[in-house]
Amino acid sequence: MISVSRTVSIPDNEVTISAIRAQGAGGQHVNKTSTAIHLRFDIPASSLPESYKIRLLAVSHHLITPEGVVVIKAQEYRSQEMNREAAVARLVSLIQELTVVQKSRYATKPTRASKERRLASKAQKSTTKALRGKVRRHPE
């Protein structure tokens, strides 16, 4: 079981983990061993709560395919087990990050000082712009 939060967890059979050959430098070791991990998690077919599914499928994220499958490739470490843990940790953090409910902001009134600063700034800009015009001479 993969624990996402105190109340939500994902059964291991809903996550498909396969070992693949890693990319990049590493010489003979990287060419011979399958240490990278390819993790796939199907959101619509999962046992996540409906509210989680709706939020995850509504978000456009580079790790989520248009079909609603999360695809994570972990190849940071030389060990397959550490890459597996890294992939699962990235899945959990992705789900936690995308399912956080934003607190609603309540309206506040501007302070008296901020109103005065705004009006002073407007008056300053007004005089600056008035000085840009033609110079008018008053008949004496």
Image: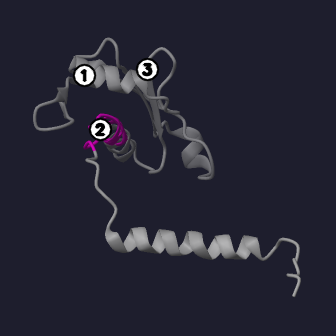
The mark that comes first in sequence, 1 or 3, is 1
Q: Which residue is mark 2?
A: 92
The mark that comes first in sequence, 1 or 2, is 1
Where does the image place residue 2, in percent across and percent down from the top left?
A: 21, 33
- Let me know if residue 100 is in the magenta part: yes
Cα–Cα span, label 2 and label 3: 14 Å
Where does the image place residue 21, in percent across and percent down from the top left?
A: 54, 35
Left or right of 130: which side holds 121? left
Disc nearest the viewer among 1 and 3: 1
Badge 2 local density, few (<14 within 10 Å), some, or many (20+)? some
User: Which element is circle 3 on?
Assistant: strand
User: Which element is circle 1 on?
Assistant: helix
Q: Which mark is residue 69?
A: 3
The quadrant of the picture occupied by the C terminus is: bottom right
Q: Which residue is mark 1?
A: 51
Left or right of 136: which side holds 123? left
User: Which element is circle 2 on?
Assistant: helix
Cα–Cα span, label 1 and label 3: 17 Å
Amino acid type at mark 1: Ser
Residue at the far top in the pictured view: 45
